[in-house]
Each structure stands twice: as C-alpha cells, then as structure tokens.
Amino acid sequence: MKLLKKLLIIIPVVGLILLTIFMPARQVSIDGIGTLSFESTITLSIGSETAYASPDWLSGWSYRRAISLSPATSIADYQVLVTLTTGTIGNPYANIKADGSDIRFTGSDGAALQDYWVESWDNTGTSRIWVEVTASGTPTIYMYYGNAAASSSSDGSATFIFFDDFSGTLSKWNVHIDTDVAITSSYGSPAPCLEISGGSTGGYPYGLAVIGSDATYAGFQNGIIEADVYPTTNALPEIIFRGNYPANTGYKGRWDTRSGDETPWMKPPYDTWGGFGTAVARFGIANQWQKAKLVINGPIFQIYSNDTLRATVFDLQYSGAGEIGLANHYGAYARFDNVRVRKYASPEPSATVGNEEPDISNTPSDKDFGPVSENSSYWSNGSEPSWDLAGDDCYFTMTNNGTEAVDISISATNFSSSGDGWTLVSTSPGVGEARMKAGKEGDNDEDEMVTLTTGDQSFISSLAASESKKWELKLETGTFTDGVEKNSTITLTATAS
C-alpha cells in the first residue's frame, strides 16, 4: 500500500498523544476536542483538519485548489480560461505570492504539470489565466501555490498553438505590405507591443499595412484567434485568417472605429477586397485597448469585441489552412498585443475554482496543547471512567469522506504506565491504564475498546463509505506525581487502506 498523506494532531491527556494518519487515494477528515478532567476542568478545541488523498502532490507547494471543468475537455491540448477573484481566493489572494509567480497547474492526477499563460494578474481583483489541458476528457485540474522560492512559469508560446506578445523581434512574421510596422517598447498590454501606422487616407490601397505569420505558422484553418487591439481615431485594425499572401486568398475581420454601419467581414484580405455578410454598427473602440476575437468553425465565422458577439457570417470560398495576419488602415496607428491562436470546441468548458486544500504531508499541522496546568496535572481518585461519546471528553473523530470503505489500522507505541512516564503514586483504586473506545455519537457500547498497557499495541477499525467514528480516550483512575506525566507520549499511527 502506498502511503500518501500525513496528518498530525497532538492532544494532551495527562501526557501528549500524537495521531498520525497516512492517506491513500481517498479522503479522510479528522477533528477533535480535549476536555481534561483535572481539579480545574479546561476545554481545549483543536478545530479540524482534512487530509486530501491524491496519488501525487506537487513537491514543494503548500496549497492547491481543484478546478472543475464543465463539460470535461473534449479534445487534447485544449486551452481553458481560469478566472480568479477575491471572492474565491481572498483579498488579497491568500497564500499566493503577490505577483502570482508561484502558481502552477497540473492535470487530474495532481502531478503532471500543464502549460499556462497569465493574461492578467491582480491579487486584489480579477485575474485571467489560460491553461493548456493535455488530456481529452479531463473533468478536473489543480492549481498549486504557496512556494516562496518559485518563479513564474507563465509561457504563452508553450500554451497556445501560436503566440506573440512582441517581447522579442518580428521573426515570427513576414511583412507583406509596409507603411510603418514596428515594435514599440513604450506601449502595450503590457509593453511592448506591435504598432502599425495608418498610412495614407487617399485612394487604394487606403493606407493598408499587413504582416503575416507564414514565416513560422501557416496552418490555421479552424480555431480561435485573439488579440488585444488599440486603434486610434478612424483606424481600422484587422485580423486575417486562412490567408495566403502570394495567392491573395483568405478572409479578414475588422474592428472599425469610424461611425456608421458596415459588414466587418472582408475577402480576399490583401488586395481588391470587398465586404460580405450583413452590415452592423461599427464596433471598434478608439484610443483604448479592447479584446478582439475571431471564432472560425468550418464555414461559420464569428467576430467579438470585449467578449461580446458582434456578427456571424457563413462562407465557403476559402476553406483551406493558411496564415493569420495583422493589418491596419487609416488613423495614426493601431497597436496589437498578445496575439494567440487556440483550439475551439462547443461548448467551451467553464472552470470553477474550488476550496483551498493544504498539503499536510509537506507541511504537517501540529496542534500541541502542552501541559494544561502545573497545579492540576493529576487525575482525581475514583472509579473507572464512564464513557459518553456524546460528551466533551478528550476525543478525535475520523470521517470517511469517500465512496469506498476504509480500514484504519491504529498502532499505539511508546506508552508507559510507570517509571519515566505516567508515574503512579497510589494504586488504589486504579492501576493507571489508558483506554480508547470507538463508536457513534451517543453510543456507549464497548464493541471497540482497547486498553493501552505498557509497550506497543495495534488494533483494526474500519470506516464505511461516508461513515464517521468517534474515538474517545480515558485514563483509568489513579493519582500521579505532579508534572511528570507530561513527559509521556502515546504515538498513534493510523493507516488507511
């Protein structure tokens, strides 16, 4: 059996009790409370902890959140948008580095790293991250965080089919028609970005400038093209798809900032183009960044501005694969940034971020009560302790949160009832034994009872699916020397299988 997760809880009853749970590929939670019945009764809450059972945990990371995908990915290497908000993660984001550089994503196994790209980051607001999910049929991925030594692994080129944030050169592109095409380091979303001038507003070709991706990528046929676009007044930024510059074939969609109505669809894209499809109100936004998106699915084309669908058209003329391109007419210039191509499936999976899970195996949760009081560190004389699993005695509760039965093998070691441990002063009426009993709340039957005498013992318990069982610890009556008992320990190792 592979031991996976460990949970440490320390409860003092005259001495210290250390409970360790190793988790398999299931989930078991534990909580407890300690009421120490000395001359002064003190109740100490230990809260609750949950051990998240997973085949693997990303080494070095302290926290993770499950991200549910609905529907599950239908194709391999699919790019999924994950949105983080303060309502889910905290304000500022809890346990994540302020710049987000320690986030990582894995597949459903919790271990296989997935490529990702941070589109925007604001740890006191909303953040958008694209994750390339490797396997088709994936219903859950994980976001890990909580590693102070980690640096960012955000990588657009690894995440998307094609990507350029213009942080380097124009080596991914060919300049087909150049009025003034250049990377500007002073502007961008964030800087740098591509800037294409508007050229002449006179006759044909109306100030057109074009760059195409055929230097490195000419395989676009279907999918989604997205970019951040900043047009100046009267500019007409355009995105070309299925393009072939030498043959002058393909299409383009435009984000025209001028007033009036016009179809946003043009073909062919490089020369002697004409509009097709229904005219709509022009939707380019001058002098600010907007999100431009084209969804191309066979003969059906959709154009979006800031995630709002603006127009749909059907056309069969150019069906083959080609390059993507960036173009502009008019205005002082249009800027482009974060140009990317990703896969498309309908419906697109939506991502729901789950609750935080601590990596208990890497960062054990130790709850050490220590001695309660030097003046009340012995048990009162009396009869054998009464059992009441509905009461506030010292207990811990284990719950099987999974759908399969779990066996719990509990080993008690290091217990001593005399000597340098729980030193017995008077043997009347008790003999100084520790006893444990398990049952349901309010169940006082002794079906599962163990007496912990000097030495090591082990016993088996079991938890059915969704079952909760309460273990109560008692010390049989006796009088012990003041202060000595805190040196004793019972180490309980519970192994789930």
Image: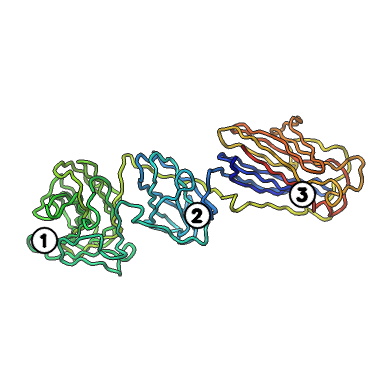
Q: Callout 2: helix, strand or loop?
A: strand
* Earlier-in-chain disc, 2 versus 1: 2
Name the residue furthest front. Answer: 1
Residue that sits furthest to the bottom in the current view: 186
Quarter location, residue 471 = top right
Look at 71% across and 44% down and name the residue there: 492
Query: Tag 3: residue type?
Result: Thr
Q: Which residue is mark 1?
A: 206
Residue 40: tell me if it is visible: yes
Q: Which residue is mark 2?
A: 145
- Residue 425, image x and y in percent? 91, 48
Numbered circle sitting on residue 489:
3
Q: Are marks 3 and 2 in contact (CB under 8 Å)?
A: no
Front tag of 3 and 1: 3
Which of the image's four quarters has the C terminus?
top right
Mark closer to the observer (3, 2): 3
- Measured in 3D between alpha carbons, the distance from the residue under mark 3 to the one under mark 2, in whole angstroms, is 35 Å
